[in-house]
Image: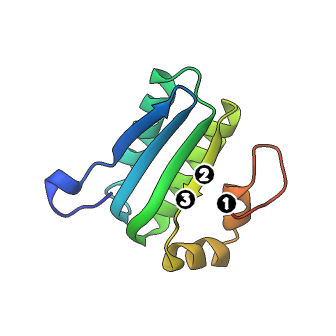
C-alpha cells in the first residue's frame, strides 16, 4: 500500500486456491491506505466463501502509522469471526519492532483462538 504513484497504490491479490488469498502490500500502511486495505480484504473474504487463510505479504511495507496499525487488529477480528487465519508474512524488521513494541505481534500472529506464534 502506498500514497505515492497511483499504479502502486493498491495491493495485489492472488488466490492460489479456494481456501487461500494473498494480498501483497507495498509502500506505507497509513492513514491514507488503512481503510483501503480493510475494504479490499473484506471484499476478498466475501468473494471467496471457502476462505480459510488470508495472507498479507508485508515484505514491501515501508512504514506503518497508528491508523495502519489499528487496521491490522480490526482485520484480525473480522477474519477470526469468519474462521479465517490471518497471516502477516515476510514482515520487515521495522514492522516487527512496531508490532512488538505495541504488544500486537502475538495477538496478530497467533492462530484463531490459539496461543501466540510468530508466523
Residue 61 x/y as whole percent: 40, 66
Q: Which mark is residue 12?
A: none
Question: Residue at image x 49%, y 73%?
Answer: 92
Instruction: Quarter of the image for the N terminus: give it.
Output: bottom left
Other-residue count near label 2 (Cα within 10 Å), few / some / many at <14 / 14–19 / ≥20: many
Q: How many marks?
A: 3
Other-residue count near label 3 (Cα within 10 Å), few / some / many at <14 / 14–19 / ≥20: some
Q: Which residue position holds label 2?
A: 87
Considering only order in the chain, which callout, 1 or 2, is on the residue closer to the N terminus? 2
Left or right of 41: which side holds 13?
A: left
Residue 27 x/y as whole percent: 32, 65
Q: CA distance from mark 3 to mark 2?
A: 6 Å
Q: Are marks 3 and 1 in contact (CB under 8 Å)?
A: yes
Assign a secondary structure to mark 2: strand
Does 43 appear above or below 98?
above
Question: Residue at image x 33%, y 60%?
Answer: 26
Q: Are marks 2 and 1 in contact (CB under 8 Å)?
A: yes
Residue 80 x/y as whole percent: 69, 38
Q: CA distance from mark 2 to mark 1?
A: 7 Å
Determine the residue located farthest toward the front in the rendered image.
Answer: 16
Q: Which residue position holds label 1?
A: 119
Assign a secondary structure to mark 1: loop
Instruction: Quarter of the image for the C terminus: give it.
Output: bottom right
Name the colour scheme: rainbow
Considering only order in the chain, which callout, 1 or 3, is on the residue closer to the N terminus? 3
Residue 6 x/y as whole percent: 15, 54
Question: Residue at image x 67%, y 66%?
Answer: 105
Q: Are marks 3 and 2 in contact (CB under 8 Å)?
A: yes
Assign a secondary structure to mark 3: strand
Q: Which residue position holds label 3?
A: 89
Amino acid at each position: 500500500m502506498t500514497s505515492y504513484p497511483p499504479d502502486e497504490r493498491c495491493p495485489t491479490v492472488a488466490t492460489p486456491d479456494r481456501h487461500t488469498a494473498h494480498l501483497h502490500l507495498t509502500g506505507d500502511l497509513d492513514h491514507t491506505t488503512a481503510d483501503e486495505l480493510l475494504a479490499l480484504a473484506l471484499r476478498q473474504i466475501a468473494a471467496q466463501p471457502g476462505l480459510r487463510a488470508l495472507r498479507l505479504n508485508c515484505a514491501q511495507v515501508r512504514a506503518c502509522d497508528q491508523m495502519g496499525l489499528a487496521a491490522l487488529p480490526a482485520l484480525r477480528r473480522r477474519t477470526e469471526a469468519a474462521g479465517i487465519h490471518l497471516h502477516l508474512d515476510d514482515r520487515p524488521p521495522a514492522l516487527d519492532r512496531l508490532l512488538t513494541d505495541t504488544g500486537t505481534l502475538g495477538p496478530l500472529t497467533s492462530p484463531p483462538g490459539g496461543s501466540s506464534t510468530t508466523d
